[in-house]
Image (spheres, rainbow, N blue to C red):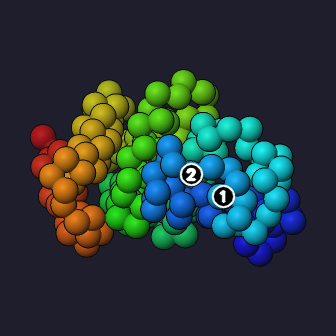
Amino acid sequence: MNGLSKKEKTRMTIMHAAKGLFERYGLDSVTFSQIADEADVCRTTVFNHFSDTCELMLALTCQEVEDAREHCRQAGAEGTELIYTLFDKLIEDAAYYPSLTSRLINNAILNSEEDNPIRTIEKITVSGLEKEYPQEQSGRLCMLICGAFYGLINHYHVNNLNFDAGQMKAEFRELLASILIKK
């Protein structure tokens, strides 16, 4: 959190506390008072940053996507390697917070805001594809790749499988290899 203002640090602390509580107890069971206690701030401080749970969830999703984007930047990944790097990071996060990740994804998908984090994931994916595939093909491939990611997350939930990041990444890479066959 170096380089952040006090307000930004407090916001990040609240978000981190909320993530842990949401994962442990579920979104519907956690109050802003509990989040405030966990973050060691006043309840009004939480409300100063987030007006309701929906706003907090959107902020959490945006932060996850921004963290993944920064991870890709630091890795210097381009082309299809960018896609592998992006989804490896998203899978690692999903393995750490499986229930929360699924809820965040679902809520973001239903959000029609311009800065929708799911739209950002798609834009990053298309930018990697456009280096190696024609533009018209990139859009369809993006849909398949993102669908494979959401499908993998849902498959693990539906079948009560352990969210093991290594295993999930390997499975996703196999899916990607079958999607990214060049003709």
- Of residue 135 and residue 118, the one placed in the foreground of this image is 118
Dividing the image into 4 quarters, which one contains the C terminus? Answer: top left
* Residue for point 56% across, 51% down: 30
From mark 1 to mark 2, how far is it between C-alphas? 7 Å
Drawn side of residue 53 relative to residue 180, left or right:
right
- Of residue 182 and residue 140, the one placed in the foreground of this image is 140
* Amino acid type for the residue under numbered disc 2: Val
Coordinates of residue 54 in the picture (x, y in percent): 60, 37
Q: Is residue 79 visible?
A: no
Coordinates of residue 91 in the picture (x, y in percent): 35, 60
Looking at the picture, does residue 3 appear above or below residue 116? Answer: below
Drawn side of residue 141 relative to residue 48, left or right:
left
The residue tagged 1 is 35
Res 30 label: 2
Res 19 label: none
Coordinates of residue 167 in the picture (x, y in percent): 20, 69
* Residue for point 45% across, 51% down: 26
